[in-house]
Amino acid sequence: MRFAIATIDRYIGIFESFCQAGWIPLKLFTVPVRDPEFGTQHSSIAFAERRGASIQLSRITPQDIADLGRASCETLIVAGYDWKIPPWEAGIQHAVNFHPSPLPEGRGPYPLPRAILEQRPFWGVACHRLSAAIDAGDILATETFALRLDECHESLNLRVQMAGRRLAERVARDFAELWRTAVPQEGGSYWPRTTMHDRLIDFARPVDELLLHVRAYGRTGSVASVNGTWLIVKRAAGWHEMHPHNPGTVVQVYGHGIVIAVRDGYLALLESDMAPPHVSAELAGHPGKI
């Protein structure tokens, strides 16, 4: 089957799986790099070039959909593409999206942190028909797995990638039947994109809750106000201990480590950076949760 794909390196396994199943890639749509750690597309571009597919870094337009149809493209596959896809039905036969949640739960731009915060017992990836409503199309198939109590953003991100590859192998192999028998979504939930305010660390909370919070956002970053300075926190440790300090008090600094008193112990910020200007601007006037 001839296909186009809109994706980034995080989901290159999906791209590779369809090609390994004998599908023929015509075009890769991807996005300019915004976050070198999470939003790269170098590997996807290199893979597309090796397969002889053309590459586009600008937003998909209705004209692009029409051009795909004229090139006899049968299917558009979407995975981790930030821009909304224009109506496709008049140009191509099929369009599917691989979404990093076990739909119908967790519709929305990036549900992984909330899955950890809510300590969901399992998670997964769903392949659904692309619809006008976000992440609401009929479901072709889902790949699920159990979450650990100590799950973190980075482990869940990798597990979602692996589940996406497994799911893509199944969808590529049985696409016609799965498309024909796709099941409408019922109920479910939409999770909006998290804000910087959602990412704030509240030092008045218990240490276990704070460790869960930091694990949930991982290297995408929690936000903390430390002595009036906004920090992006990527890794932390913590322990329970009785102490006389007010929550938010800095009690120890060594190298890059900062130990801060919390309600029932201490939180050690092990890896943190100064917040970039756009974060400070978004939180301007906010006193910080201390």
Image: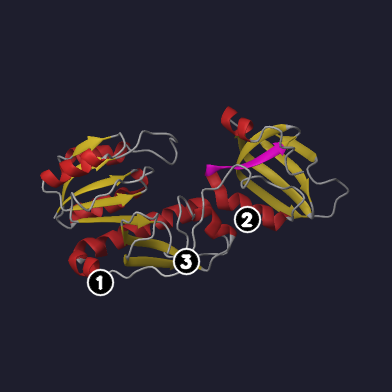
Q: Which residue is mark 1?
A: 181
* Quarter assignment of residue 287: top right
Horizontal and vertical percent for residue 87? 27, 49
Q: Which mark is residue 212?
A: 2
Name the residue rendered at 32%, 61% in the picture. 128
Q: Is residue 38 left or right of residue 62?
A: right
Mark 3 vs 1, N-terminal side:
1
The answer to whether residue 22 is above or below residue 55 is below
Q: Amino acid at mark 1?
A: Thr
Quarter where residue 283 is shown: top right
Q: Is residue 25 left or right of residue 37?
A: left
Query: Which residue is at a point 55% across and 56% down the rendered structure image?
Result: 114
Name the front one of labels 3 and 2: 3
Give the residue drawn at x 47%, y 60%.
106
Range of the magenta residues?
A: 220-225
Question: Badges 2 and 1: C-beta atoms under 8 Å apart?
Answer: no
Depth check: 177 or 210 in front? 177
**Quick check: 184 above or below 277?**
below
Q: Is residue 141 visible?
A: yes
Q: In front: mark 2 or mark 1?
A: 1
Where 244 falls versus 121 (above or below)? Answer: above
The percent coordinates of residue 101 (x first, y second) are: 43, 60
Mark before the other along the chain sequence, 3 or 2? 3
Real-space Cα separation, disc 2 to disc 1, in angstroms? 39 Å
**Secondary structure, magenta segment, majority class:** strand
Dot 1: within a 10 Å radius of its alpha carbon, few (fewer than 14), some, or many (20 or more) residues? Answer: few
Question: Could you say which is closer to the camera, residue 184 or residue 282?
Answer: 184
Q: Amino acid at mark 2?
A: Leu
Alpha carbon distance from label 3 to label 1:
20 Å
Element type at marker 1? loop
Question: In the drawing, what numbered circle is on residue 188?
Answer: 3
Q: CA distance from mark 3 to mark 2?
A: 24 Å
